[in-house]
Amino acid sequence: MRPNCLFLALFLFAFLLAVGAVSIHHSCHPSGDPQPDKINNPVMKDIAEFAISEINKQSQKKLVFQKVVSRRHRKHLEGRIYRLFIEVRDESLPTSPIMNYKVYVYEICWKNFRKLKFFYQIN
């Protein structure tokens, strides 16, 4: 009877571990985008705001996210590369027009890793 209890305990542990791994992977938006039909969804907004915060750390500007104009993503190694065209306003200037930027962000969501690859003005 004792080997059966050990087997049952190991089975339950493996099952709970597998369920936990699936739920963690699901929270990483495995398709890359939980709302592929919407340009301005929370995932794209979060990635754009991450890119803007990284640039604000490196520069004297105070860029503020306005909206995502277009987007693409593709698998790359362990993660994804997001290419966004975004509208941004520079609040460090008194009368800043809305400016367009091209942004590339590499993300490995299951490792909680993001890196800004490119961020440059296109207008």
Image: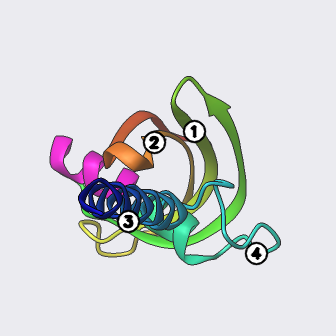
Using the rendered view, name the quadrant where residue 20 is placed.
Answer: bottom left
Q: Amino acid at mark 4?
A: Lys
In the picture of the structure, the residue carrying the numbered disc 3 is: 12
> Circle 2 sits in a helix, a strand or a loop, which is it?
strand
In the picture of the structure, the residue carrying the numbered disc 1 is: 80
Residue 53, x across and y down, in percent: 27, 57
Which comes sooner in the sequence, label 4 or label 2? 4
Image height of 43 relative to 47, above or below: below
| Mark 4 and mark 2: Cα distance apart in space | 20 Å
User: Badge 3: few (under 14), some or many (20 or more) residues near its Cα, within 10 Å?
Assistant: few
Residue 39 seen in this snapshot: yes
Is 1 or 101 nearer to us in this picture? 1
Marks 3/1 in contact by CB < 8 Å: the verdict is no
> Circle 4 sits in a helix, a strand or a loop, which is it?
loop
Which region shows up in magenta?
50-60
- Could you tell me which residue is drawn at 76 percent across and 75 percent down? 38
Which comes sooner in the sequence, label 3 or label 2? 3
- Could you tell me which residue is drawn at 38 percent across and 38 percent down? 116
Image height of 93 relative to 109, above or below: below
Dominant secondary structure of the magenta stretch? helix
Residue 38 shows which numbered tag? Answer: 4
> Circle 1 sits in a helix, a strand or a loop, which is it?
strand
- Could you tell me which residue is drawn at 60 percent across and 27 percent down? 76
Considering every residue shown, the one lying at the far right of the view is 37
Q: Amino acid at mark 1?
A: Arg
